[in-house]
Image (cartoon, rainbow, N blue to C red):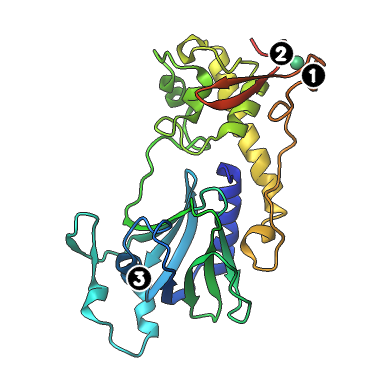
Amino acid sequence: MPELPEVETIARGLANRVTGDVIESVWLGSKPEPLKSTASEIVATLESTRIAGVHRVGKHIVFDLENGGRTSSPVPRKSRQEFSKTHEGMLVPRSNTAQWIVHLGMTGRMLVCKPEQPVEKHTHAVARLSSGRELRFVDPRRFGRLSVAHGFESGGLEPLEVKLDLFVELFRGRKTPIKSALLNQKLLRGVGNIYADESLFRAGIRPRRRAASVTRKELPRLYSAIQEVLKEAIRLGGSSVSDYVDADGEEGFFQLQHRVYGREGKPCLVCKTPIKRIVIAGRGSHYCPKCQK
Ligand SMILES: [Zn+2]
């Protein structure tokens, strides 16, 4: 399952490939699960827009769309192009800030393809670009989601941007285990199971500790560890970005060298104590009983 660094890598790869391109038309498959907005809403929002940029928000890929693409079409657009329907069914004028939001779920991929490349099984959306290429959304297990929005916000603070004092405030008075707090998307967006375990190891904090019990001395260590782990993984992903966004790339996500995650019973890389695995809020959590207090 792609976590924050993978989504960041994919968003950057897409930004390099499709920024400035114009979405000429959109095809959507018949499976309802991938569509979080209605099909007509997605088509109306995407068609004839220019991709102004692609970035990551939490674990979402966000395409910023501008109306500028319309000039490329010699045919006058129909009136539906001027408005977008909101979830409440209201018609609102299309602003210059429409966004196409893609969540990859477990197995979703966003591919930049030449049109002659065979359409893979489980392709749920194809956006045809004025450059002649296609953006295809492929997702065998269909946990991924496509939607459109204006001024998208996913809640929670961005772990790579949050200031230390705000980060420290997140955990004040919280009785849940620190591990659960790190996974709570309303606090921090995009930190998943693997990176939570790895960050807690580097910070020397046991995953089951109450969030509120993590001291003022430990929190800055945790803050740095999270940023370090995520940035390291993003750097690693940069070299393999082609595997995730180019249709001829190989599948499979890059992996940070895990120090605790998935290493139950194996010796700690620092002190050789066997790594323990416990379950917290249904998620496997890995830690070194000696290095983490
Ligand atoms: Zn250890």
Q: Earlier in the sequence, mark 3 or mark 2?
A: 3
For the N terminus, the image quarter is: top right
The disc label shown at residue 43, or none:
3
**Mark 1 lies within 8 Å of ligand 1 (Cβ measured):** yes
Q: Mark 1 sits on what residue?
A: 270
Residue in the foreground of this view, choosing between 180 and 10: 180
Q: Amino acid at mark 1?
A: Val
Viewer-nearest of labels 1 and 3? Answer: 3
**Residue at the spot 39% in from the left edge and 60% down from the top edge:** 32
Where does the image place residue 128, in percent across and percent down from the top left?
Answer: 48, 77
Circles 2 and 1: CB distance less than 8 Å?
Answer: yes
State the count of labels: 3
Q: Mark 2 sits on what residue?
A: 291
Residue in the foreground of this view, choosing between 158 and 86: 86
Q: Secondary structure at mark 1?
A: loop
Judge from the rendering whether residue 3 lies leftward or rightward of residue 68; answer left or right. Answer: right
Judge from the rendering whether residue 144 lies leftward or rightward of residue 76; answer left or right. Answer: right
Viewer-nearest of labels 3 and 2? Answer: 3
Q: Secondary structure at mark 2?
A: loop
